[in-house]
Every structure is written in structure tokens, then in C-alpha cells.
Amino acid sequence: MEKAYKLEFFGEKKGNLFVNCCGMSKTEPLHCFGPAIKPHYVIHFVLSGKGMFSIGNKEYLLEQGYGFVIPPDELTFYQADEQNPWTYVWIGFNGSMAEELVKSMGLSLTAPVFKSDKEKEFAQAVMDMIEHNTFGVANDLRRNGQLYLFLSLIAESAHIEEHGEMDKADYYVRRAVEFIMSNYCNPIKITDVADYVCINRSYLYTLFKKAMGMSPQQFLTTFRITKAAELLQTTGLPVESIALSCGYSDPLVFTKSFKLLKKMSPSSYRKEMQKGETRKNKEYLKQIEDFINQVNRLNS
């Protein structure tokens, strides 16, 4: 008989990422589950033994150090080995970010398996969830924290090199754009962006020129000035405050960058916008809209 400990977490489930269930199991020979579907993501990690996992008409023979993802509403089957049945831990989760996170780790219906040497860490994350199983904000946060840790262990072992060249380029540019969009208000440099996506600056430059038609520095500057133009038009904040809000510690550097891109000073731009729907106004608004659409197309 299977020796298992499983927890289901009830209550309202909403947000970017949240835990649905977790557990650990020491299975009997040939113990199986399915064919069946799950309503949320489930990731199993094998601590010892062997077994078989089947999804999308493909079978995977797995052993200690391997894990597999079950996407929502996908028919799957898995079974313990007859001679050396597996012991595994699992976490079920969902949320608005779940699909994108799973994809970013390199996992999908056609690539559902990963490998890691962090058996102890995977087990500890699930055990911590089980120990903090009661209702309450503190325990909810604790379990979600362990979920992020669990997923980070998988991400550490993700092999982006196994993707095609186009996939790699798209992945790096997407991550770089996301980093810039989240940190443009800070005094970041392109070396910070390159370090974040774990590639060198010259390679990032090549990828950006091909995908965006501009260098990473040009993109960062354009994004900052676009945000500054929005603030000049929609708020009464001083130019110095807008500069600081868009990552410029020196208002003079900000003004120089703004004039280079918009062909007028920040104060002149604000006055122009206050005149109403002039031709220039419409042109500037279209420039902002076009730039935002370009970014959105990359992230879609």
C-alpha cells in the first residue's frame, strides 16, 4: 500500500501564484495514477527509486533527481517501478503567472521533464509546507514562499541551451525588456541588464538590434523618456522630480536626453501638451503609443 501524506489548501484562490496542494509519497511496486487530468499545475520530484511518466502519447522513464510537470487539463499517467518503486514529493499550484513561469523554466507539454541534484532542498520545501498547514495569513505567505523556492530550484537546473537559437534570442530579449520596464526608475546600467539575464553585454546588444531595431541603451533611454513624457503631460510634478522618477539623478542629463529624443526641452514639451490637441500633440502621443505597442508585441 502507498505511504503518502497529502495536503489540500482550501479557501479563495486568486493572485499571481498560489499553492493548491502538496505532499510526499513512498509508493508500492507498480503503484499508479491515471490516466487522469488535474485542474492546476502539479510538479513531482523523485527523491529515490524509479518510475514511468506518460503525457502526450510519450513515455519518460525517470529516477532519482528527475522531476516532471503536469499542466492543467492534460491527460497523464504515472507508475512506480516494480523492482525499485519511487519516492517523490509534489506541489500543485496555479495563478495568473503560473503558465508564464512554467514556460520560462523551459517546461512544457513537449518538454515536461527536468533534472536537478537538489533532492534535499526539494524535500525540505515540501516538508516546510506540511509543517505550516493551518489557516492564516502567515502560513499562506510561508507556503507561497516555499512554492517560489521550489520553482527556483527547478529554474536553476533549466537548460536554455536546449532551446533553438530563435527561442534563446527571444527569451533573453524578453527578460531584458521586463527588467528594464520594472527598473527604469532606478539608476540601472546596461551591464546590470546583461548580468540579470546572464549574458555578456555585446551579445545582448546583438540580440536587441535584431529584435528591437535599437541597442539596449537606446531602448532604456527611449523607455525612460516615454515615461517622462507621460508624467509631463498628466501631472504637475516638477521636472526634477520627473527626472528622478525615471532613473535620472541629474536633471541636466535628463533634459539633454529628453531634448535629443523629443527635439524640445521637458518644460517646452509640457507647454506644448497644454495647448490642446495640436498636430504636434497628436504626433507625440502617436510616438508614445507606437513605442508601447512595440514593447507589448514583444511580450505577447
Image (cartoon, rainbow, N blue to C red):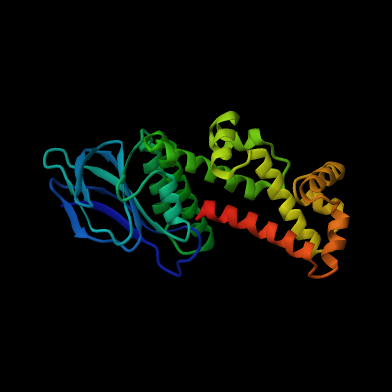
Left or right: 275 with respect to 112? right
Expressed as whole percent of the image width and height from the top left, the position of residue 42 reads 33, 54
Is any part of residue 126 visible from this angle?
Answer: yes
Q: In which quarter of the image is residue 93?
A: bottom left
Instruction: Judge by depth and name the residue closer to the eye, 121 or 265.
Output: 265
Q: Is residue 129 placed above or below 160 in the rendered structure?
A: below
Residue at 72%, 53% in the rendered image: 226
Q: Is residue 152 placed above or below 131 in the rendered structure?
A: above
Expressed as whole percent of the image width and height from the top left, the position of residue 190 reads 65, 36
Is any part of residue 132 visible from this angle?
Answer: no
Q: Is residue 163 placed above or below 132 in the rendered structure?
A: above
Residue at 69%, 61% in the rendered image: 286
Instruction: Judge by depth and name the residue closer to the eye, 71 or 132.
Output: 71
Left or right: 241 with respect to 125? right
Q: Is residue 116 placed above or below 236 in the rendered structure?
A: above
The number of numbered discs placed on residues in the rendered structure image is: 0
Furthest residue toward front: 279
Residue at 80%, 48% in the rendered image: 258
Left or right: 186 with respect to 93? right
